[in-house]
Image (cartoon, rainbow, N blue to C red):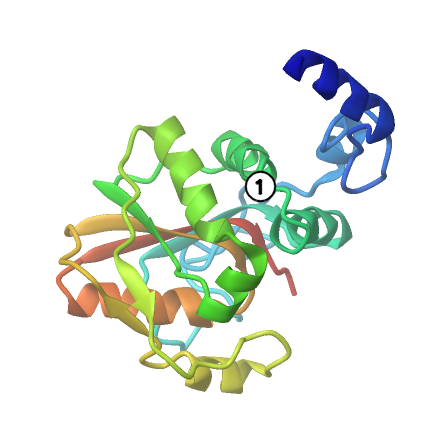
Amino acid sequence: MRAEVSVLLDLLLPTRCVICAATGDDLCDSCRAGLTRLRAPRCDRCGAPTAWPVARCKECSGRRLAFAHARAAVAYDDGARLLVAAWKERGLRTLAALAAELVCETVRRPPVYTLTFVPADPDRRLQRGHNPAANLANELGDRWELPAPALLERAAGIRPQRGLPLTERRRNVRGAFRVTERPPTKLALIDDVYTTGATVSAAATALRKAGARHVEVVTFARAVR
């Protein structure tokens, strides 16, 4: 009976590519190939693509960043935006596994003892019914054979980052995270999208204050300026 229902649903609601809407898979081969992978050369610190390898780029030079390095699988361009929107806002949780595949194809496994993730805003978590960063961390943990416990929580009263200018983003997340248990000395912080680095840097600051000495950042996508 379950198999018959599944076949009927496939006929009535066929799976479509979240980018081009072609029937078949959540992400068709053409759109998958069209995602811009973020490989070298890049900034060694924040992972921004560069014309040649640099230790710090214009984007992160002069900033106090609490993480050692940030790496992402793809550029946050039009295709990646549609994929992330389907994953986060439309609730297609299976896309977390796809995002993890793309990360593992592009980003080297970090030399850490554990993974953790940026906690979701409670209202967004309730609205979506899931935390994309947590889902991605769990998928990566399975592939990299690393635990992915929740080590952080958000402080109350923090505004969403979306739409805020860069300086306000940094101010908004200052002190926004609390550590729920002592972290290991080396860990990787997982999030879905790296926009300005303000959120992951604030989360890494909380982890380091609690005892972490080395924090890597890994995200599915990254804004490229």
Q: Quadrant of the C terminus?
A: bottom right
Q: Position of residue 109 (x, y in %)?
A: 37, 35
For the point 44% across and 81% down, which residue is it?
158
Q: Position of residue 66 (x, y in %)?
A: 30, 67
Res 12 seen here:
yes
For residue 97, side relative to residue 198 (left or right): right
For the point 53% across and 54% down, which residue is it?
129
Name above or below for residue 56 compared with residue 168.
Answer: above
Q: Residues within 10 Å of mark 1 (few under 14, many from 20)?
A: some
Res 60 seen here:
no
For residue 14, side relative to residue 60 (left or right): right
Name above or below for residue 130 compared with residue 99.
Answer: below
Secondary structure beneath disc 1? loop
For the point 26% across and 38% down, which residue is it?
147
Q: Quadrant of residue 108?
A: top left
Q: Position of residue 54 (x, y in %)?
A: 46, 57
Q: Position of residue 100 (x, y in %)?
A: 51, 36
Q: Quadrant of residue 13?
A: top right
Q: Which residue is mark 1?
A: 93
Q: Quadrant of the N terminus?
A: top right
Q: Amino acid at mark 1?
A: Arg
